[in-house]
Amino acid sequence: MEIKQKIEKINEISEDIIIEINEIRDEKLKKDNIVNALPEMLKKSIEDFKKLIVLIEIPNDQLVTFVNEVVDNHYTQLDNYSHQGYYANSVQKYVDIEAILINLRGELKRIDYLSLIGDKNVVLVGGNGVGKSSFASYLKESLSNNIIVVPAQKILFYNSNINALHLTGKNEMKNIQEQNFIGQGKFNQDNNYAAGRYINELSELFSKLVTVIANEQVKEEHKVMESNEFSDTSRDNTILYKINKLWQTLIPDIILELDTTNRTLIPKKNNQVYSLNSLSDGEKAILYYICLVFLAESNSFIVVDEPETFLNVSNFNRLWDTLESYRDDCKFIYISHVIDFIVTRSNAEMLWCKKFSYPDYWEIIRLDHESNLEDIFPKELLSEILGARKPILFCEGEKNSLDYFVYTNLFREEVIVCPVGGHTKVIEYTRAYNNSPTLDNNIAFGIIDSDLMNEHQILKYKEDSIYTLPFNEIEMIFFTKEVIDNTLNHSFSEKVVDEKTTKFIKKFFDIVNQDKEEIVAQTIKKFMDNQLSNYRINENKSTMLMVKEVNLWIEGLSIPDLEINVRKNLEQVILDNDFNEMLKVAPQKNAISRGLANKELDNNYMEKAMGRLSRDNTLVDVLKKRYFKDIIF
């Protein structure tokens, strides 16, 4: 019977049960809560099955296979109960039908979630605690055989003493793959027996996988012998040959040989035989993943929780690329926090697990459908901000920059700091994040250099949650009195610290005064660079008109007047000997931080000051209250 016919038959049976319930004459039975609720449940299932008829027309082999299994299971169960003539308890029949419908409801929800997966494999991202592993466990609760879940927990030890290990076959492995190892690993209360049983079963999985591969290889070789077709083609089609071919693209110096006596695999390197347990954790993980994927049913969904476990970047990239290519009949659903892994899945779609409500509701967003986030944010950055459960702070620089170091240490409790390069990207990403209807469960902030901004511009950016640094450059925070005192007091007396600080400040002013014209030029250049990076010609027009527009725009910047004001302001700071103001205008980070500071304050001053900032919470609090009090997350 075709799937459409089965759906039609299921709906006929459901309608018959509704009629049967409506014709009940037993008053007590008519008042039963379950009996009363069943007609609406059945009507809902009829509507849901009508929708499935449309769904199976979609060219998605894995989803269609899953739908077929759900329909088959439901048809068999419902047909059996509808034809069972006698029930000792008159209510029991309807209790059983209710149980079937409740199970169906779960399967239909799984179909809805899996229908988010299109032509490509997917990576499910999201913060800790939003239910990603619980989602994998929920999928595994299905009665279908075409959902394989690879748990994050792995005990990769080969134990030849497992009872009747050599008899483990493909059918038993199907039963093992039906187990929900993720769900079993979550205990509501201390239960030593359940925990022990779980660990025991999990620890046997690797050994049984290897044994199944060995037994399958023996069976396939036996078939070849029976057919008398000894050829390269027949050899190439055996499971161990295929595994070795894949394995050696990753581990070229080791081959896996068959031990027919003990029904296991033997690693061989340079003609020397080794134990499976002598393989590295990474090598055993590769073998574990290969075996599981090779044994998956056709057109399966393969859900892999933490697919990078035990593997380095080079290995997990090549491993999953190769497995995806080998099992192109399957869809891979990866669950990962590791940005390096997420970025390597260049051909995979990203699903965002935004919210989880216990026990079985997940708000999962397919980013390419719901928003233009993938067009705005690079994949690496997007995977990081989607996994954040604290506000985001976009800053200038990179992960190895001083900006990132400072802001991470200052605001580690309040925000996730994301360096994004230049100040234009900080502005762009902060606005895009906060204006996105999809990212409505969090908020983003930005922090940028002031770059000659006037008070009006600073306040304007603040309206968009973008703050300006209270120093000319981030290095200058290390030359505030608070940081200098905190750093030097651990090595020198108070008197010596005062002397060093006074001498340092005097020479700081001397350098600025000496390089005054260079500082003015640097300041104007930075201002112009920022202005040019944001400027766009208004519309297509003739070359002459465009040149004229640009010239008018440059004239409007009043650069000569700006230069006069910058010089005048710098000269006033020098005249007033105002060191705090000097930190706001001086751009000579290298001359001061790597030259003068090491000579007048202490050897390797910056490294020592950075160490104090990273370790001293009191210093962090002082700096935040003094220089960043206007930043409220």
Image (tube, grey):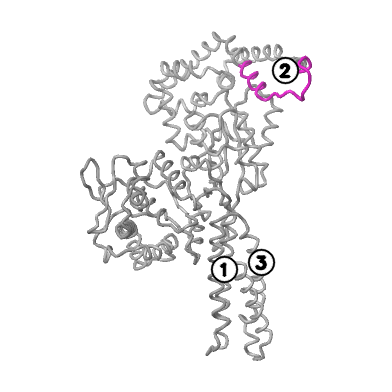
Q: How far from the left and from the top, in percent, is residue 494?
A: 41, 24
Residue placed under numbered mark 3 in the picture: 50
Per the rendering, the mark at residue 71 is: 1
Which image quarter: residue 602?
top left
Q: Which residue lies at the image location 55% right of the left edge and 10% below the top edge?
A: 515
Quick one: quadrant of the N terminus?
bottom right
Magenta span: 523-546
Q: Nearer the viewer, residue 288 or 26?
A: 288
User: For the residue labelled by badge 2, is the local secondary structure a helix, a strand or a loop?
Assistant: loop
User: Label 1 near label 3: C-beta < 8 Å?
Assistant: no
Neighbours of disc 2 within 10 Å: few (<14), some (14-19), many (20+): few
Per the rendering, the mark at residue 557 is: 2
Amino acid carrying mark 2 in the image? Leu
In reply to whether residue 251 is colored magenta, the answer given is no
From the viewer's perspective, is the residue at label 3 or at label 2 nearer? 3
In reply to whether residue 532 is colored magenta, the answer given is yes
Magenta span main SS: helix
User: For the residue labelled by badge 3, is the local secondary structure a helix, a strand or a loop?
Assistant: helix
Q: Nearer the viewer, residue 290 or 590?
A: 290
Amino acid carrying mark 1 in the image? Val
From the viewer's perspective, is the residue at label 1 or at label 2 nearer? 1
